[in-house]
Amino acid sequence: MPQNLKWLYANRALRSFATAFLTVIFPLYLAVSRYSAAKIGMVLTLSGIVSVILLAGVGIFGDTVGRKRAIIVLSLLSLVGSWVMSSMNGFWLIVLASGLGGVGKGGGAGSGGSWGPLFPAEQPLLTEAVTPENRTKVFGRISFVGVLAGALGSLVASVPEILHRRGVPWITGYHLLFGFSAVLSLLMVLVAWPIQENRNNRWREQNGDDEPPPINARQLTGRLGLTNALNGLGFGFLGPLLTYWFYRRYGAGPAELGVLYTIINLATAVPYLLASRISRYFGAVRAVTYTRIVSIACLAVIPLMPTFWLAGMGYLLRMVFNSMGMPARQSYAMGVSNPRYRSRVAAFSNLPSQLTAMISPAIGGSEMESFLDFPVYGAAFFMALNVIAYYFAFRHIVPPEEKNRASPPRGLHRSATKSHEG
């Protein structure tokens, strides 16, 4: 249903806007509240348990009750979580509220908000709104909308510092932004309401093909789950912990970090629009592999940078190349999945990522006390393992739009096509 796209774009924009400033301010809010690095990591780990429960629930709820309803329910839970953080600061309340509010579950700067418990409901709706040939383009466009909204949201992260210069306590400034996030969650409910959902779609109806999907749901979920588990370990070392690393390593405050994250969001917008071209040229799996390799190399050199802005530019390059392959990866998973089980595939294939991402912040926060750069190197290591596993798991699984392509570019897909047809 093409008319759904404008509402899905609007919902992503609101979510990315809120996630952008929450990702920056939340660990700094904990630091101002006298939380140690180890305790900050523990909060992020425990709140991840809440996200895992939500993610699994969306996978089942979305396929059985409705994906639109899942988006609305999650938005209401986010509203409650943001309101709690704006008015209370007990340890367990913060853990529960940050999990419900999706703090740190947006993928960080430049990710376009394409992470967290909500996307297993969002991605099937996107897929059903377009043809297979345009699927990656639409995934790129919604990420483009997300990073532009995130760029504006990152600027909002400087509000507590601006208010502090005028005599307002740091805590009060952070609480105001948590309250603003609650308002944005309410707006997310309103823009999700007009979405129309067709829950009777089938593979043959969408692809005009008498053949079944190239891989069954259980195998697809298992392979994605394995690769995402490795990626989750890597991402868990970054996420909100990265803003704390910049704070400790270079003394960067919320204003500097907000500006950096704004620049990153703006710089990664155009590469999202290039994702469909790159995917058509190389094929989805190779596009993801090549762009991730360069991205990891950029990440690994960040701790070698002598100043905050040089390190920030290294992180910018990491996110630019990462963003080129992200829509292809998400679109590919939906493209080879049976429409009946897309929410479950999206949710349960990412469940291992959520579980492993809960482990990393506690480890990274603890190890930072003795080796400050540990989270960055740990992230690079596990993300490299992810790329290797992903390529070997999916190099012979071809989505419909590539299978139907008359002449794969430069023979890059010949072996994969032959394997599929055989």
Image (cartoon, rainbow, N blue to C red):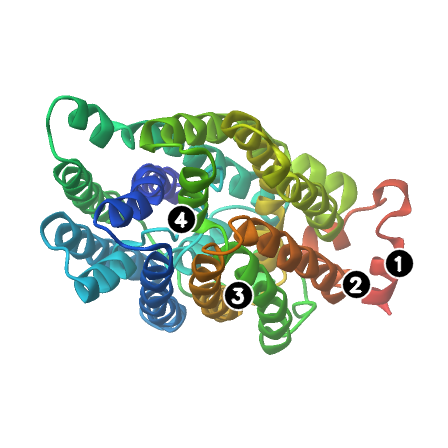
Q: Which residue is mark 2?
A: 396
Q: Earlier in the sequence, mark 3 or mark 1?
A: 3
Quadrant of the rendered image containing residue 248: top left
The span from disc 4 to disc 2 (Cα, nearest Å) is 36 Å
The answer, for residue 2, to whether it is visible in the render is no
Dot 3: within a 10 Å radius of its alpha carbon, few (fewer than 14), some, or many (20 or more) residues? some
Foreground pick, 361 / 353: 361
Q: Quadrant of the C terminus?
A: bottom right
Foreground pick, 301 / 266: 301
Q: Which residue is mark 4?
A: 240
Q: Earlier in the sequence, mark 2 or mark 1?
A: 2
Q: Position of residue 119 (x, y in %)?
A: 42, 55
Q: Which residue is mark 3?
A: 202
Identify which amino acid the numbered label 1 is placed on. Ser
Foreground pick, 247 / 403: 247
Q: Which residue is mark 1?
A: 415
Dot 4: within a 10 Å radius of its alpha carbon, few (fewer than 14), some, or many (20 or more) residues? many
Q: Position of residue 203 (x, y in %)?
A: 58, 64
Identify which amino acid the numbered label 2 is placed on. His
Q: Earlier in the sequence, mark 4 or mark 2?
A: 4
Q: Position of residue 332 (x, y in %)?
A: 62, 54
The answer to whether mark 4 and mark 1 are in CB contact below 8 A is: no
Residue located 34% across and 71% down the image: 53
Q: Secondary structure at mark 3?
A: loop
The span from disc 3 to disc 2 (Cα, nearest Å) is 23 Å
Dot 1: within a 10 Å radius of its alpha carbon, few (fewer than 14), some, or many (20 or more) residues? few
Q: Earlier in the sequence, mark 3 or mark 4?
A: 3
The span from disc 3 to disc 1 (Cα, nearest Å) is 28 Å
